[in-house]
Image (cartoon, rainbow, N blue to C red):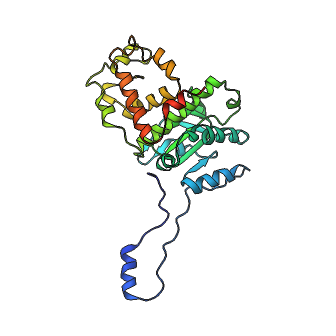
């Protein structure tokens, strides 16, 4: 795993010198403390502790704003509020038994985020500590995945709404994995992008499909992680029939670039054991 924690400080050169000078028992380096304290005080912490032992990753429902927005040398604009304890079991089930269940163990071990934050809301900070939640309430960066559905709203989602939320989890999980270099984006995906596309391609303008884009991008600040992950979102959130009747129609995908890039994403993740189309074809 790309983010495996370094638990031991090695003093190889120092110990080698001592070994040459003494027959005493070898020195053992001290353990470094964990980054976060577990358990956090609830009955379901046993599941979280087992997860930590298996993947070396932290599932946190109590956390600080810096756990969302701070990276080494970088601060993002996103924020989140800790999850409501009574709704943590539902959010745990959503992540572990719905989204994560679609990934083979080898893929999980290769791509698991360092932090999985179970938040009551996730979005942009407003004055006074208020959070403006994103529509789908899920955010990620190269170190963490934040699921902002640890609240009473989760249990009221319709099957269609829940499928959409799960697609956003898949999207952000894969986006974090590519940003963190846990998996690579194929060169042929990048090569499929035209050398130029207009800078005024808004999300509501169908012309973006002509350039193989599902969402607005800027020529000068093209985000390949966003582009790649948008296809994960597209495929896991729709059945094959819905895609063929929608964005893949020749009248929309006029140059076939959406179909081409979608095929690259499906094939690449399929080689890693993740069947995006099987996920999308479920009710």
Q: Residue furthest left?
A: 195
Say which quarter of the image contains residue 75: top left
Q: Residue 159's spot in the image, x, y percent?
A: 65, 25
Q: Is residue 122 visible?
A: yes
- Name which residue lies at 38% across and 23% down: 259
> Which residue is rendered at x = 59% and y = 54% of the image?
52
At 60% from the left edge and 35% from the top edge, which residue is drawn? Answer: 148
Q: Quadrant of the C terminus?
A: top right
Residue in front for this viewpoint, 73 or 101 = 101
Q: Position of residue 79 (x, y in %)?
A: 54, 37
Q: Is residue 137 above or below residue 253?
A: below
Coordinates of residue 161 in the picture (x, y in percent): 62, 24
Question: Is residue 197 rendered to the left or right of residue 60?
Answer: left
> Is 64 positioned to the left or the right of 154 in the image?
left
- Residue ID at (43%, 18%): 203
Q: What percent of the width, then of the height, locates residue 90? A: 69, 38
- In the depicted view, which residue is nearer to us: 63 or 185? 185
| Residue 262 higher or lower than 59, as above or below | above
User: How many numbered circles does the render carry?
Assistant: 0
> Image quarter for residue 89?
top right
| Residue 125 shows in this picture | no
Left or right of 26? Residue 264 is left
Q: In terms of depth relative to the viewer, which is nearer, 204 or 164?
A: 164
């Amino acid at each position: 795993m790309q983010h495996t924690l370094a638990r031991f400080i090695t003093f190889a050169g120092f110990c080698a010198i001592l070994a040459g000078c003494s027959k005493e028992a070898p020195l053992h380096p001290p353990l470094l403390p964990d980054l976060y304290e577990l358990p956090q005080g609830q009955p379901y912490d046993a599941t979280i502790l087992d997860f930590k032992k298996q993947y070396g990753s932290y599932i946190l429902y109590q956390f600080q704003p810096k756990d969302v927005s701070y990276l080494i040398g970088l601060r993002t604009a996103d924020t989140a509020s800790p999850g409501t304890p009574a709704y943590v079991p539902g959010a745990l089930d959503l992540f572990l038994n719905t989204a994560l269940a679609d990934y083979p163990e080898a893929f999980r071990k290769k791509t698991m985020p360092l932090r999985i934050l179970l938040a009551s809301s996730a979005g942009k900070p407003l004055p006074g500590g208020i959070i403006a939640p994103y529509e789908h309430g899920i955010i990620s960066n190269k170190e963490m995945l934040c699921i902002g559905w640890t609240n009473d709203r989760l249990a009221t989602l319709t099957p269609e709404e829940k499928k959409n939320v799960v697609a956003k989890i898949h999207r952000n999980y894969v986006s974090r994995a590519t940003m963190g270099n846990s998996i690579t984006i194929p060169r042929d995906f990048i090569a499929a992008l035209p050398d130029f596309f207009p800078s005024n391609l808004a999300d509501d303008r169908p012309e973006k499909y002509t350039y193989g884009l599902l969402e607005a991008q800027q020529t000068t600040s093209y985000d390949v992680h966003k582009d790649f992950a948008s296809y994960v979102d597209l495929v896991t959130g729709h059945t094959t029939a819905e895609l063929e009747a929608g964005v893949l129609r020749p009248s929309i995908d006029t140059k076939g670039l959406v179909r081409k890039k979608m095929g690259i994403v499906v094939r690449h993740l399929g080689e890693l054991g993740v069947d995006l189309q099987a996920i999308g074809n479920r009710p």
